[in-house]
């Protein structure tokens, strides 16, 4: 009863439209908040650490904490690996590694305590398969991968 009284005294039809629009917007806003899933952290995205001309060709999740990126430059024939944290924080052990599959002592690795990423590490591997890995609280490795 009170709402009807306010509508009648607030300018008739124009006020009704305003109230209806505000009510609809409120319902949509509430729906949008409910529909958006909550996440503690967004997944890391490639930061361009390998430099110009390198494009991401593969990636591996490190659980909920980070991601490892394998990039390649067709101009140089080099692969590059970077391990990224999802959230910048205090220094913690991290690692980025790449090697030519089946070739002893070909590994290039960056291991240390970092706040955001490990690497980049580069390896000329045109015409070869690579083993690549990353570590931040969890390790992921791929062997005999991306041959060419």
Image (cartoon, rainbow, N blue to C red):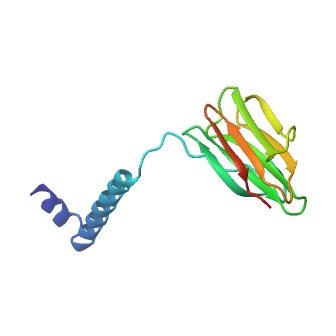
Q: Relative to the observer, which residue lies in front, 102 or 112?
A: 102
Q: Identify the residue shown where x is 80% and y is 61%.
A: 148
- Residue at 56% x, 45% y is 42
Task: Tell me, yes or no, if residue 54 can be seen here.
Answer: no
Q: Residue at x 68, y 55 (%)?
A: 58
Q: For this rendering, which residue is in front, 146 or 34?
A: 146
Q: Is residue 3 above or below residue 114?
A: below
Residue 83 located left or right of residue 39: right
From the viewer's perspective, tell me whether residue 37 is left or right of residue 123.
Answer: left
Residue at the farthest right position: 76
Q: Quadrant of residue 18?
A: bottom left
Residue 70: % across, % down: 73, 51
Q: Which residue shows up at 70% across the image and 27% down it? A: 93
Residue 146 placed where, x, y %?
A: 74, 57
The image shows residue 75 at horizontal and vertical percentages of: 89, 63
Q: Position of residue 36 (x, y in %)?
A: 41, 52
User: In this orientation, which residue lies closer to the viewer: 74 or 21?
Assistant: 74
Is residue 117 visible to us here? yes
Q: Quadrant of the N terminus?
A: bottom left
Which residue reaches farthest left?
A: 1
């Amino acid at each position: 009863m009170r709402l009807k009284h306010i509508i009648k005294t607030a300018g008739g039809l124009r006020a009704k439209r305003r109230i209806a629009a505000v009510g609809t917007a409120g319902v949509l806003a509430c729906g949008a908040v409910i529909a958006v899933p909550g996440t503690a952290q967004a997944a890391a995205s490639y930061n361009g650490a390998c430099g110009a001309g390198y494009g991401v060709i593969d990636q591996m999740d490190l659980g909920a904490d980070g991601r490892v990126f394998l990039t390649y430059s067709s101009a140089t024939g080099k692969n590059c690996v970077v391990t990224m944290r999802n959230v910048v924080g205090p220094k913690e052990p991290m690692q980025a590694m790449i090697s030519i599959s089946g070739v002893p002592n070909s590994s290039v690795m960056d291991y240390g305590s970092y706040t955001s990423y490990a690497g980049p590490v580069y390896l000329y591997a045109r015409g070869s398969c690579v083993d690549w890995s990353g570590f931040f609280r969890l390790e992921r490795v791929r062997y005999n991968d991306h041959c060419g």
